[in-house]
Image (tube, rainbow, N blue to C red):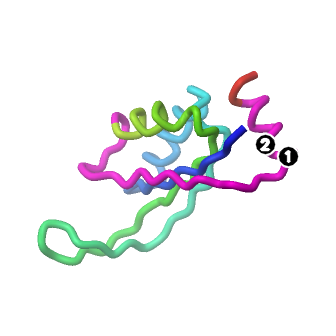
C-alpha cells in the first residue's frame, strides 16, 4: 500500500470538522490532524491576515483523485490549496491498519 498525506486549510473549525467527517464517512481518508494557525497571504492585491484551520489527511494513493475532486466540490474557498505529499517510508503496522480501514 502506498500512503500519501494531503494538506489543505479551512476558514474555521466548524467547516474543517464538517468536511473532515464527510471524508471519513466516505472512506476517502483514514485519519486527519487539524490545527488552528495564523495565516498571512496575498489576496486581491493586498496582504491579508486571518486564522485558519490546517488539515493533514492520511490516505492511500488510489484514493487521491476522488479525495481531491471531493475537496474541490466541498471546499468553501474560491482557490483552495489541496497538496498531495507522497511518502516513501511507512511502518508496516500503520500501513496494515490503513488497509483494513480503507478497504475493509
Q: Residue at x 59, y 53 (%)?
A: 86
Look at the numbered disc 1 and give the secondary structure of its residue: helix
- The residue that appears at 29% across and 72% down in the rendered structure is 41
- The magenta-colored residue range is 73-101
Residue annotated with mark 2: 95
Picture coordinates of residue 73, whole percent (x, y): 34, 34
Residue 94 position within the rendered picture, expressed as x and y whole percent measured from the top left:
81, 46
Q: Are marks 1 and 2 in contact (CB under 8 Å)?
A: yes
Secondary element under disc 2, as helix, strand or loop, is helix
If the image is split into quadrants, where does the C terminus sit?
top right
Q: Quadrant of the N terminus?
A: top right
- Residue shown at 41% from the left, 54% from the top: 10
Q: How many marks?
A: 2
Percent coordinates x, y for residue 9 in the rendering: 43, 56
**Residue pushed farthest top?**
104
Instruction: Tell me if residue 6 comes above or below residue 43 in the rendering.
Output: above
- Residue 35, picture quadrant: bottom right
Q: Mark number for residue 16?
A: none
On the image, the x and y values in percent for residue 99 come to 75, 32
Q: Residues within 10 Å of mark 1 (few under 14, many from 20)?
A: few
Q: Is residue 48 above or below residue 75?
A: below
Near-viewer residue (92 or 100): 92
Specify few, some or many for label 2: CA neighbours under 10 Å numbering under 14, 14-19, or 20 or more. some
Which residue is the site of mark 1?
Answer: 92
Q: Is residue 83 magenta?
A: yes
Residue most extreme to the front: 88
Residue 40, above or below 102 = below
Q: Residue at x 29, y 50 (%)?
A: 77
Residue 33 appears left or right of 64 = right
In the rendered image, the vertical position of residue 91 relative to residue 100, given as above or below: below
Q: Is residue 102 magenta?
A: no
Amino acid at each position: 500500500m502506498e500512503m500519501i498525506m494531503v494538506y489543505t486549510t479551512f476558514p474555521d473549525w466548524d467547516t474543517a470538522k464538517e468536511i473532515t467527517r464527510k471524508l471519513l464517512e466516505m472512506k476517502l481518508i483514514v485519519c486527519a490532524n487539524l490545527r488552528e494557525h495564523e495565516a498571512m497571504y496575498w489576496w486581491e492585491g493586498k496582504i491579508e491576515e486571518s486564522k485558519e484551520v490546517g488539515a493533514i489527511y492520511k490516505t492511500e494513493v488510489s484514493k487521491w483523485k476522488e479525495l481531491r475532486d471531493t475537496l474541490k466540490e466541498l471546499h468553501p474557498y474560491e482557490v483552495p490549496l489541496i497538496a498531495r505529499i507522497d511518502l516513501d517510508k511507512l511502518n508496516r503496522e500503520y500501513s496494515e491498519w490503513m488497509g483494513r480501514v480503507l478497504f475493509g
